[in-house]
Amino acid sequence: MASCPYLNSSMVLSKPKQPAVSFPPLDFLNSQHLSSSSSSSASPISSVRCRSRHTNHRHSLVRASMDKPRKHLKIMISGAPASGKGTQCELITSKYDLVHIAAGDLLRAEIAAGSENGKRAKEYMEKGQLVPDEIVVMMVKDRLSQPDSAEKGWLLDGYPRSSSQATALQAFGFKPDLFILLEVPEEILVDRVVGRRLDPVTGRIYHLTYSPPENEEIAARLTQRFDDTEEKVKLRLQTHNQNVESVLSLFEDITVKVDGSLSKEVVFAKIDSALSNLIEQNILGMAAT
């Protein structure tokens, strides 16, 4: 998500101390999920065949859903600056077809559209003031209420960033099925940020070490964001660290923590596994009712 300087500084997350919640493997052979139409006099072989057909049906149901996994998932994802959150959001929305919602993008779009919330936000911005939380919360709430979010499910990117924002969203009935937190050591985050460069022509982000520009022409026009310095990123991380625990305290029972220092493919594999398990649990829950 692109940085938005007008978002309240309380809207930054940090590394939590609570242990991650792990998702146990599902037992498709649990007796409560097996049924048989055979009578008590049926042979053992008939009973086994019936159970086998029923179990195979369960597997088919799961596989069918995983081929088209759009069961109204409600996901929040958080991470410090340069934790790789933007990349993972692209991968998640690409596979699971969720509506990607980022507070900073919403703020800019509402202002451009001249909506009531956008007009209110613009007044604060023109005075050089921070946009109050309640305005941004209403923007997020309105976007989550749109038909496409209800139909396809949503991925809320980097929001909420304070316990008050999380509580406000819950009061409107918006609570995630899963809260994903990307954890990356500070020294790696600083290295990622300081080496980051922007191509003003294409908008593409490069890194001088890990993702250098393709040629000298591109390299010559790259720019560095004014706050992508070691001193300033450490201040941003400090703010992040001061606020995330209050958010996680509301979602600790549904939080999955992922090591964001690994390759983007490995990070996504772990997130994908958690989302797949969540879908499987939902399917079995629906089948049991």
Image: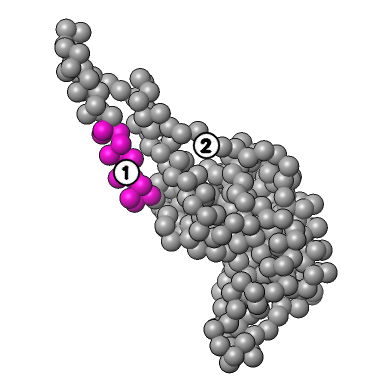
Between residue 156 and residue 181, name the one nearer to us.
181
From the image, tell me which residue sits under label 2. Answer: 23
Residue at the spot 30% in from the left edge and 23% down from the top edge: 34
In the displayed structure, 30 sits above or below 56; it is above
Residue 277 quadrant: top left
What amino acid is found at the position of numbered circle 1 in the picture?
Answer: Arg
Q: Quadrant of the C terminus?
A: top left
281 magenta-colored: no
Tell me the magenta residue range: 56-69
- The answer to whether residue 29 is left or right of residue 105 is left
Residue at the spot 40% in from the left edge and 28% down from the top edge: 27
Chain-order first, disc 1 or disc 2? 2
Between residue 177 and residue 267, name the one nearer to us.
267
- Which label number is shown at residue 63? 1
Q: Estimate the x, y position of residue 190 in percent, counting from the top left.
A: 74, 65
In the displayed structure, 141 sits above or below 176; it is below
Is residue 45 in sight in this rendering?
yes
Q: Estimate the x, y position of residue 286 in percent, counting from the top left.
A: 38, 33
Q: CA distance from mark 1 to mark 2?
A: 18 Å
Q: Quadrant of the N terminus?
A: bottom right
In the displayed structure, 146 sits above or below 30; it is below
In the displayed structure, 288 sits above or below 164; it is above
Q: Estimate the x, y position of residue 181 in percent, counting from the top left.
A: 63, 50
Residue at the spot 20% in from the left edge and 8% down from the top edge: 40
Between residue 132 and residue 216, name the one nearer to us.
216
